[in-house]
Image: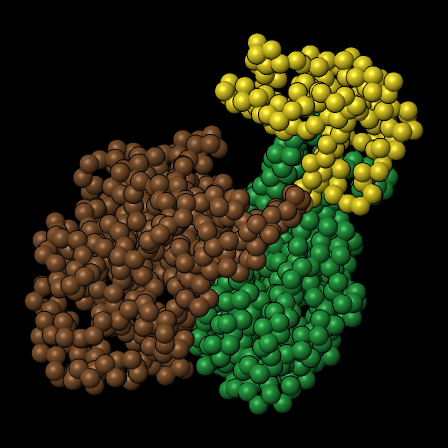
Chain colours: A brown, B green, C yellow
Amino acid sequence: MANQPIPLCHAIRKKPQPPAGLDSPFWDVAESQPVEERQSLQLHRLRETISRVRNVPFYQSAFREMNITPESIRTLDDLRRLPFTTKADLRDSPPLGFCAVPREDIARIHGSTGTTGRQTFVAYTAEDLDLWSDLCARFLYAGGLRKNHLVQIAFGYGLFTGGFGLHYGVERVGAAVVPAAAGNTQRHITLMRDLAVDVLVCTPSYALSIAETARAMGFDSAQLPIRYGHFGGEPWTQDMRRRIEQELGILAFNNYGLSEIIGPGVSGECHEQNGMHLQEDHFLVECLDPETLEPVEEGEVGELVITSLTRRAMPLIRYRTRDLSSLDSRPCPCGRTTRRMSRLTGRTDDMLIIRGVNVFPSQIEEALLRVEGTAPHYMIEIDRPGSLDEVTVHVEVHPQTFSDRMDRMQALRDRIDREIHSITGLRVKVVLLGPQTLERFTGKARRVNDHRKL
Amino acid sequence: MIERITAKDGPFHPASAVDFLPLQQLHDLQSRRLKETVDLAYRRVPLFRSRMEKIGLEPEDIRGIEDIQLLPFTEKTDLRDTYPFGLLAVPTSEVVRLHASSGTTGKPIVVAYTREDVAVWSEVMLRSFAACGVHAGDIVQNAYGYGLFTGGLGAHYGAEALGAAVIPISGGNTERQIMVLKDFNVTVICCTPSYFCYLIEQAEKKGMDIRQLPLRVGVFGAEPWSDEMRKRIESSSCVRAFDIYGLSEIIGPGVGIECVQQAGLHLFEDHFYPEVIDPVTNEPCPDGVEGELVLTTLTKKALPMIRYRTHDITTFISEPCACGRTIRRIHRISRRSDDMMIIRGVNVFPSQVETALLAVEGTLPHYQIILSRKNGLDHLGVLVEVTPEFFSDTVSGIENLHNLLSHSLESALGIRVDVRLVEPHTLQRSEGKARRVLDQRSLGEQEAGMDGFENFCPGPNGK
Amino acid sequence: MKIKQLSLFLENQAGKLYYPCKVLADAGIDILTLSLADTQQFGILRLIVDDWEKARTVFEKAGSVVKVTEVVAVEVENRPGGLAGILEILEESRINIEYMYAFTFGRQDRAIMIFRFEDSDGAIRVLNTKGVRIVSQTDLKHHQNGREC
């Protein structure tokens, strides 16, 4: 937590330099391992994974059908013979149906955000947790985190993997954690200032919101003691990075992960801030055309498909992330030999990421269905007036439920608000509309209007 | 019920051995640790040193645990006045964790932990779980809020250290809580007792009988509860309900817990030395006589607390416990010696409510705090009389006032507050002032525990 | 040209309406018209009375929070489209209406609407230029008396 004041130009310099006092450039030497060496490790670990998942019913039957055994995997190209795994496969199986270890070996269970029926759960053994901490330590260290730092984590804890992944990663590096979680922004800022916090961990839009609130509280947000930020959980742009860096006077780093695979820690940026290094000794990453499922050319945008190589409790084979990105295998000046993925450019499904929470329009629909008196006509408007996403759900009221009593109408609105919150975890603004006021669609209904400029 | 738990008591955990130390050995350990703690605090904490000097006391004067009464007290206000790091006994570089809670007024109370402190915390939480029959292989659903509140992470680290599987579900989303309880064959739940009552009720509504689940242990705290409530919980579920005690100033949850005998809370006095004193004369109370609990940390490095006044009222139980533990027991906390309220683990003082109302209106309106329990959750309502200056003839104007008040209160207290505007002169007055606090929570009977590990800002996904 | 309206804060509970009406009755004050805005938690009672100053005094004495606001009483022709014509003028001039309610009295050909505008003076100006008749406080009493005659 030692707090040497750093000149502001450090943060807004075009090419950021590695953090001062860099003892070793990498958290783990594996990050700079020669590519061929890593590939043979990958092949070895892929075979191990194939053998580990053979007791998972889903893979058992798929492998039998496709004649796959660990021995039949001769080169990394054989990966393409393996079956895909989708979110639907996880959902359709029993809660721990993809678990490859005995129940007593499970040390932790996390879940994805989602409706009760839609939610998927992920299990971890003690070894998985250890690996997870280490993977997060890698990118945190690459982005300047050191032992003597104090890190404020403004991600929600709980079933969501964001908070815990970073929490244990920071502990692994040996730095101190302020587990601020989600909550009151002013209090976040007060703590940050009073405790002299060095590193901020949250979603990029929340970082901007902190900058705005700090200004509203009457101080120059660039005077906040923080020097580095590790942001993830939602897509963001280069423009946004520049704004965050300027307004908070920090270096802002991007990281990527998803709970099905492990949580944050799949990839993260180095101080070059030019793409996220994939932790390829633990994950095999493909970038495929989502239609043909053939690999795209390097640098072209495609869907990321990830195979975990070292997970114990729940290894997944060729998991279709639905995230669009591109890969870059050119060497990075930082010395890491891993490929880099670009920031996410979109999704192949209709999932929305609102303030770091994954939401499907169908969840909103489900919430509305639970409330009697609303017609199944709705429109979701998403906006980012300041730095935080705002969602407004316009709902038509059923003619029979319309009441001349304002308290009844308010109660209806509150009820919808509560249902949406309980299903999605999001607070939205609900606007009641008269019957027959929304546009009707003959073909595929367009229920979402996303006005955010991402 | 009882057979069920004894059958599954599981193997004895080696960490629990200290609970059974022969008294002489325990006292020797306490004496040695007290001397170390006093020495550390004297060298590193200016406030403590100056208080020692003021009464002409040197660390050498403390020869053993029996000399503890010579030492000066520490109050919650000391933490506030030295905010944020004034009582820190180690360099900040040795701190690995910070938790915070709302203080009596604007400034939060910040508590720091070194790596060793986190290890001690995990150990006492492990021993807490072990004392109520939890063991490796159990599946623990932790529904305490995670974050700056010590409840969530405290229980989490303890269960992890024990080798149990942790489901860090945090608070809220009852439907999901019930689904997870069932789908993952959860055996242990950690939450507030009233929230568990609500879970039972909601499960029943869904046609589910919690008695059919493998769930067998509930570790309940963070709010006042009673033996009546325990009876209700245990008769409507096959869960044995244990009371856990702790406070963030000392370490968080894990200062003490009931053992399977359910006859008072054992305090882990090898780490936290307890005294019960008369809050007025500050003289020690004999066993069986009610007084204020005063705690001294014996192993904390970052934030050693010497004779911390908890303001919790309890009594020592002198008879040895049938479980064989030699560490002392106290009765459930019966009440507080100050006006602090504990709402879902959050400590709230009426003075904080006043500050927040003042911030909006400029002058203090007549108000009343109503504590109630809805859907198994403690609920804080504030009735505010409308004043002419803030009355508007438009609905949106009054809704705006309502929102300002709610926002101000919620950000000051860190919990959800239901503000209700009422007509002038409708609140009950005593000597011209409205009666400030109305506690409508039924705790079953008069004797109620108050186990407040402090909360700060719970709630999912921010605002 | 503006007239005085009294607003009272009421909790949304049974019996809450009776009390202010009783206060006025006891003081011999006549209610010319009223409107009630209700929400889940509270209501706002808006009153136009024959003696607003006296009414304010008795309410304050009774301990109620009472607010005096200026509203505009507009004469409306009692025929289809009468009100629409006035609203059209307001719409064209982008005059924002906070709320409005009707004032009823004995005459067949005329009605009076009470408007609360964001900008009362602006609204009066616009309505005047379009030849709409604004009713003053004394006119109101007169109307009232006329009705009683």
Would residue A429 be seen by someone viewing this image from the given angle? no
Placement of B290 over or under C139, stated as above or below: below
- Between B61 and C68, the residue placed more toward the observer is C68
- Between B132 and A411, the residue placed more toward the observer is A411
- Between A293 and A325, the residue placed more toward the observer is A293
x and y percentages locating residue C9 in the rendered image:
74, 34
The residue that appears at 18% across and 47% down in the rendered structure is: A274
Left or right: B218 in relation to A265: right
Left or right: A78 in relation to C90: left
Placement of A226 over or under B168, stated as above or below: above
The residue that appears at 46% across and 66% down in the rendered structure is: A116
x and y percentages locating residue A360 in the rendered image:
38, 57
The residue that appears at 84% across and 33% down in the rendered structure is: C21
Placement of B235 over or under C22, stated as above or below: below
- Between B181 and B395, the residue placed more toward the observer is B395
x and y percentages locating residue B410 in the rendered image:
59, 45
List the single residue furthest toward the top: C129
x and y percentages locating residue C129 in the rendered image:
57, 9
Placement of B304 over or under C9, stated as above or below: below
The residue that appears at 12% across and 79% down in the rendered structure is: A73
Q: How many marks?
A: 0
Would residue A100 be seen by someone viewing this image from the given angle? yes
User: In which quadrant will I find the N terminus of chain B?
Assistant: bottom right
Place residue C137 in its image quadrant: top right
Left or right: C115 in relation to B422: left
